[in-house]
Image (tube, grey):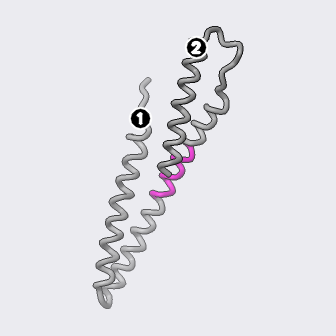
Amino acid sequence: MQRFDVHEELFLPVQSELSKTNEAIAAAEKKYIEAQGAEKEDWNATLANLRTKREKLQRQLDANTEQQEKQYQTWIDETQPRATDATTESTERLQKRMEEQQKRLAQIKRNR
């Protein structure tokens, strides 16, 4: 079994595709303004397609972010140091892990 970096495997490809789509929309809007007649209709259709693609990518990114945020929050809520922990060392490790998870959750919320 192998773990993979969710950020690299899921978020970066979607974010880069979203950036490319935004650039394409900006270029298409510029050409739409310059176009005349039937060419203007073609650019309008292209813009509509690009905007639809952007909305789909944004929804995908938001869904992934919400899921990750929910998982971190659940872990933080359910994992509290207990008085029954055998040693202070295990309590300290758990506390450190909780702080790391809270930092990751804060980072996810900032990236939204």
Q: Is the magenta stretch mostly helix, strand or loop?
A: helix
Relative to 8, does residue 97 appear above or below in the rendering?
Answer: above
Residue type indicated by callout 1: Asp
Residue farthest bottom in this picture:
37
Query: Residue at image x 41%, y 35%?
Result: 5
Question: Is residue 53 in the magenta section?
Answer: no
Return the mark for residue 5.
Answer: 1
Residue type indicated by callout 2: Ser
Q: Which of 105 and 32 is in front in this view?
A: 105
Gap between marks 1 and 2 measured at Cα: 26 Å
Q: Position of residue 25 (x, y in %)?
A: 35, 69
Q: Give the range drawn in magenta.
A: 57-68
Q: Which element type, helix, strand or loop, lies under badge 1? A: loop
Return the mark for residue 46.
Answer: none
Relative to 42, does residue 63 appear above or below in the rendering?
Answer: above
Q: Which tag, 1 or 2, sits closer to the chain's start? A: 1
Query: Residue at image x 66%, y 13%?
Result: 85
Q: Position of residue 90 (x, y in %)?
A: 58, 14
Query: Residue at image x 28%, y 84%?
Result: 34
Read off the residue under disc 2.
Answer: 90
